[in-house]
Amino acid sequence: MGLHLRRAAAGFTLIELMVTIAVAAVLLSLAVPSFTEATLSGKLAASANDLVAGVAVGRSEAIKRNSVARMCVSTNGTSCGSGGWEQGWIIIIPSDSTVVQKHAAAPGGFKVTSSVTQIDFQPSGVGSTQASITVCRATPTAGSQERVVQVDATGRAYVSKTTTGSCS
């Protein structure tokens, strides 16, 4: 009765483990660029949507206060300035210098460009400054995606997605 049953060792062999790691590395190398583009898309959409929301606030404040409201580039958060929208922006009532809303600078590496540095909203809600504001990634490399915020003469804003990659 000296039979001893021997149990087989459980676990993976070194070769099985190396093959699994190699397959995982290949799958990960394929997934990372897609994840990076999805992340970029989300950040661009968030920045563009912040601008659209700012336009809506500016227009509604002009109507509510029966006074001109201005959305403009601002580096200090208290007055209109010059430069790019990526520095930050405010909504201000020029007649009494009341700042209605402040928005911080865009995420690092992002550029927000436009031919205008301010958008005025009339008390009637129409007759606003027409503008086109482009949100894109400038560094570390220019992304292929952009968001363009169009503000029409009625003070309404619309976002469109482009892939021109012309951020410079």
Image (spheres, helix red, strand yellow):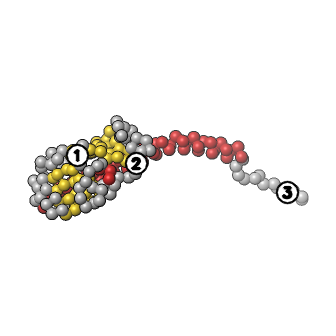
Q: Amino acid at mark 3?
A: His
Between disc 2 and disc 3, the foreground one is 2
Residue 100 percent across, percent down from the top left: 22, 62
Picture coordinates of residue 18, whole percent (x, y): 67, 44
Q: Is residue 137 left or right of residue 98?
A: right
The location of residue 154, given as percent across then percent down, is 15, 47
Q: Which residue is mark 2?
A: 109
Q: Which mark is residue 116?
A: 1
Above-or-below relation of 152 to 77: above
- Quarter of the rendering occupied by the C terminus: top left
Dot 2 or dot 1: first in sequence order is: 2
Q: Residue at x 15, y 48 (%)?
A: 128
- Res 57 seen here: no
Residue 34 visible to an observer of this rendering: yes
Q: Residue furthest front?
A: 82
Image location (x, y in percent) of residue 69: 16, 56
Tag 1: amino acid: Val
Q: Which residue is mark 3?
A: 4
**What is the spatial separation of the Cα atoms under label 2 and label 1, in whole angstroms?**
21 Å
Contact between marks 2 and 3 (CB within 8 A): the answer is: no
What residue type is disc 2 on? Gly
Q: Secondary structure at mark 2?
A: loop
Q: Is 147 on the left-hand or right-hand side of 61?
A: right
| Residue contact between numbered discs 1 and 3, judged by CB atoms under 8 Å | no
Q: Residue at x 20, y 59 (%)?
A: 92
* Whole-number angstrom distance, CA of label 2 to CA of label 3: 69 Å
